[in-house]
Image (cartoon, rainbow, N blue to C red):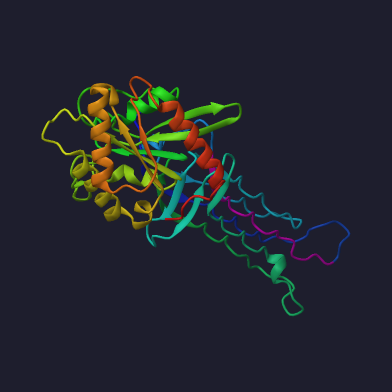
Amino acid sequence: MRFVDEAVIAVQAGNGGRGAVSFRREKFVPFGGPDGGDGGKGADIYLVGTEGINTLADFRYHRTFRAPNGTPGSSQDCTGAGGSDLEVPVPIGTVIVDVETEEQLGDVIGFGQRLLVVKGGKGGWGNTKFKSSTNRTPRKAMPGLPGEKRELRLELKVMADVGLLGLPNAGKSTLIRAVSAAKPKVADYPFTTLHPNLGVVAVGIHRSFVMADIPGLIEGAAEGAGLGIRFLKHLQRTRVLLHLIDIAPPDPEADPVQDARAITAELKKFSADLAKKERWLVLNKLDLLPAKEAEQRCKDIVRRLRWKGPVYRISALARQGTDALCRDVMKRLEELGFQPPDEE
């Protein structure tokens, strides 16, 4: 199924039912009176976090949702039945924004979480409500109020603890395949990954975290180069970023340091908060160079970048150094503890 991380839908809550105009007509009751009941309330619409949905693809075909109306009131002061609320399933990590006002209505971050997006209209009054000492036979009732309607933009931001960042072919997909059960496509050409992939990395008994493989970012992405910055929003929920660098790029003229600085610049263009996230340097593809040359190149990259944070040297393909990396990531996540997702 195609990965879709944005969709626009229209939602219409139910209208309230009309109030009734009715009078008592009972045998041996000399004086009747109004007994028209109120109309029922229109149904609300909720977006509900649902397990097993990983994309907004279903909303490409079903874009309009309308809740049922309330039923009219009836005689004997009977209130009409309210409409049954409509629940629309959405994947975990969905942000809901009102298209007209650009107001963020909420963020679905848990299974079973219900977010009210439009309210149903109230039912109209029956003629009983208009009875008074001067108007004993009111022939007036009110229509139900219309339900709210909105156009909503749904934005999916994957829920992951760790995000992989780097140029195309830096080895992000290979790493997530090596440490989890995820099977993203791997090939020897750039932009193999066209949508985010999630993998659960198990470190021990009841110790695991979610890793996200984000499509490669290149210089000029903010201006639309490559895949642009469309998928960078999926890194906003992560707590730790792993910046992968290929120490043996296929192009001999390529400079890993310059490429790393270019990616940092693109992060700042996209979001200052994202650029400030904790980032670890992961030097990948050690197996492509002799041990001494690989060691020297790693030292040179760290020195030129003036990197002050954690540095790891791995070969994702050979699974060299990946276990230690995952253990340290797990330990760091446990130190950070639970944090609510960004409201950015």
Given residues 55 and 209, the one toward you in this image is 209
Q: Is residue 314 left or right of residue 167?
A: right
For the record, the magenta segment spans 31-49
Q: Position of residue 131 (x, y in %)?
A: 73, 72
Q: In the rendered image of this protein, does residue 295 appear above or below residue 217?
A: above
Q: Is residue 106 left or right of residue 152?
A: right
Q: In the rendered image of this protein, does residue 162 appear above or below residue 101?
A: above
Quadrant occupied by the C terminus = bottom left
**Where on the picture, by quarter, is residue 288?**
top left
Given residues 213 and 120, the one toward you in this image is 213
**Where on the picture, by quarter, is residue 132?**
bottom right
**Where on the picture, by quarter, is residue 198?**
top left
Given residues 20 and 47, the one toward you in this image is 47
Quadrant occupied by the N terminus = top left
Q: Position of residue 329 (x, y in %)?
A: 47, 37
Give the prevailing secondary structure in the magenta stretch. loop
Q: Position of residue 93 (x, y in %)?
A: 47, 43
Kindly identify the residue that appears in the image at 58 percent across and 44 percent down. Answer: 113
**Residue at the farthest front position:** 292
